[in-house]
Image (cartoon, helix red, strand yellow):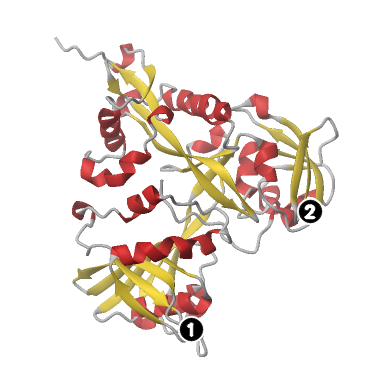
């Protein structure tokens, strides 16, 4: 007779991860993503699993669902804000349609994020885009996957490559420079996350069994005309039957000239016939550099989803491109205590947001707020789709203008 309780007769128990249960928890996470747990694969990333913020349901001591979060700092338009980076969300197949995910999401948002009071919003990557809207998450960033034939990537005449140069370097050489380069990039890219040393180490972790036939991760530095390193790239190469392919993981530079020269170096590698970059912003400059716009194949994907949990603090953590004074009637079916009317007085210096009993100019959901928060989705698009209500003519256009930002939001980091 099996000691295992049948799923339909089980009563799952909510538990927090401990040091003793961490490995079993990570094995459940791996199974949830149809993978096999290997401690080497996690590498430094295992230290990002904050035990007190990771939990799930267990049956007979076995994890049947998981989720967790860690604190990151996200760039907002004109500022930054701490966010709860939600990760490792799984439910075992035998326990689907039992409400475990809903219970975990409510527990996480109320008993972790809101109770802590340090992060006014949560952020996640959705393995399935249909899942998280009902919990108040809205798509806050999108990404492009780009690819093409390297021989077709001729730049426009007159593209300035500057007076510097590019060289391949070791991982240690690259990581000594990359954080400083990325700091300048971070300040101007809404949706991007900070990286601690642990997160840099985790990002650079490169177990051989995860390379899928490609090379080890390789690194480039761009040196300005005076010899100062001011740009970096990380990439792999792979040989295929129809020639080599370069797969770019990351590419940043402090100047447009350095950015263009790094791209030119990668596209001109000997024996390489194709390139691929899985995640670039929707305003990726390479698309403007090449002479043949059709030569770059692009695929648009949803990326991170944001869930505001403290509306006044979240909205005050960014700046706005125009003066705005509007009352938003925010519906929140999942966390009704957060619903209500909020007066948003905002402008280029920031915002003051307070609850109010005044008549609403616009009715929308907390999911809609998550979508427009970083400027990637204009409120006019949601209005044209019939998802929001405009009660004061012109208010939707005013919010759209104020929430817009010159650079498209983008999150280069998986978590």
Label 2 Cα neighbours within 10 Å, binned few <14 / some 14-19 / many ≥20: some
Q: Is residue 293 above or below residue 301?
A: below
Q: Which mark is residue 398?
A: 2
Left or right: residue 174 versus residue 345 is: left
Label 1 Cα neighbours within 10 Å, binned few <14 / some 14-19 / many ≥20: some
Q: Position of residue 342 (x, y in %)?
A: 76, 36
Residue 295 position by quadrant: bottom left
The reply to whether residue 169 is visible in this rendering is yes
Left or right: residue 319 versus residue 32 is: right
**Most foreground residue, 12 or 320:** 320
Q: Earlier in the sequence, mark 1 or mark 2?
A: 1
**Most foreground residue, 313 or 272:** 313
Q: Quadrant of the N terminus?
A: top left
Residue at image position (85%, 33%) is 358
Q: Position of residue 370 (x, y in %)?
A: 61, 43
Residue 368 position by quadrant: top right
Residue at image position (36%, 62%) is 175
Residue at image position (60%, 55%) is 376
| Marks 1 and 2, how far apart at CA | 37 Å
Q: Which residue is mark 1?
A: 291
Q: Give the secondary structure at mark 2.
A: helix
Q: Quadrant of the C terminus?
A: top left
Left or right: residue 400 versus residue 187 is: right
Contact (Cβ within 8 Å) of mark 1 with mark 2: no
Q: Give the secondary structure at mark 1.
A: loop
Q: Is residue 129 above or below residue 159?
A: above
Q: Position of residue 199 (x, y in %)?
A: 39, 49
Q: Position of residue 316 (x, y in %)?
A: 70, 44
Query: Which residue sits furthest left?
Result: 1
């Amino acid at each position: 007779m099996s000691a295992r309780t049948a799923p339909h007769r089980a009563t799952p128990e909510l538990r927090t991860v401990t040091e003793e249960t961490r490995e079993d928890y990570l094995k459940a996470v791996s199974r949830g993503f149809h993978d096999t747990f290997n401690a080497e694969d996690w590498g430094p990333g295992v230290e990002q699993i904050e035990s007190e913020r990771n939990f799930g349901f267990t049956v007979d001591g076995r994890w049947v669902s998981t989720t967790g979060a860690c604190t990151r700092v996200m760039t907002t338009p004109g500022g930054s804000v701490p966010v709860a980076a939600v990760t490792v969300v799984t439910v075992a197949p035998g326990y689907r349609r039992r409400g475990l995910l809903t219970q975990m999401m409510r527990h996480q948002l109320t008993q972790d994020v809101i109770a802590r009071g340090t992060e006014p919003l949560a952020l996640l990557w959705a393995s399935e885009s249909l899942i998280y809207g009902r919990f108040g998450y809205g798509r806050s960033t999108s990404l492009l996957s780009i690819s093409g034939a390297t021989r077709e990537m001729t730049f426009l005449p007159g593209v300035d490559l500057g007076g510097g140069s590019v060289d391949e370097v070791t991982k240690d050489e690259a990581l000594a420079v990359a954080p400083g380069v990325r700091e300048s990039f971070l300040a101007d890219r809404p949706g991007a996350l900070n990286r601690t040393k642990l997160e840099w180490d985790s990002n650079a972790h490169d177990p051989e069994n995860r390379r899928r036939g490609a090379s080890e991760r390789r690194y480039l530095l761009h040196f300005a005309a005076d010899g100062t390193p001011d740009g970096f790239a990380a990439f792999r190469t792979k040989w295929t039957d129809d020639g080599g392919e370069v797969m770019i993981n990351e590419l940043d530079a402090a100047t447009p000239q350095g950015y263009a020269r790094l791209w030119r170096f990668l596209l001109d590698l000997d024996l390489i016939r194709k390139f691929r970059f899985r995640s670039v912003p929707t305003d990726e400059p390479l698309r403007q550099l090449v002479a043949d716009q059709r030569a770059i194949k692009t695929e648009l994907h949803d990326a991170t989803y944001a869930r505001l949990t403290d509306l006044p603090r979240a909205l005050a953590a960014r700046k706005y491109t125009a003066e705005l004074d509007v009352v938003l009637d925010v519906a929140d079916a999942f966390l009704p205590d957060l619903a209500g009317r909020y007066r948003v007085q905002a402008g280029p210096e920031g915002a003051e947001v307070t609850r109010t009993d005044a008549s609403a100019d616009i009715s929308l959901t907390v999911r809609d707020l998550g979508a427009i928060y970083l400027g990637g989705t204009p409120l006019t698009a949601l209005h044209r789709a019939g998802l929001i209500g405009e009660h004061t003519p012109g208010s939707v256009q005013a919010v759209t203008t104020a929430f817009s930002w010159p650079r498209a939001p983008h999150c280069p980091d998986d978590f």
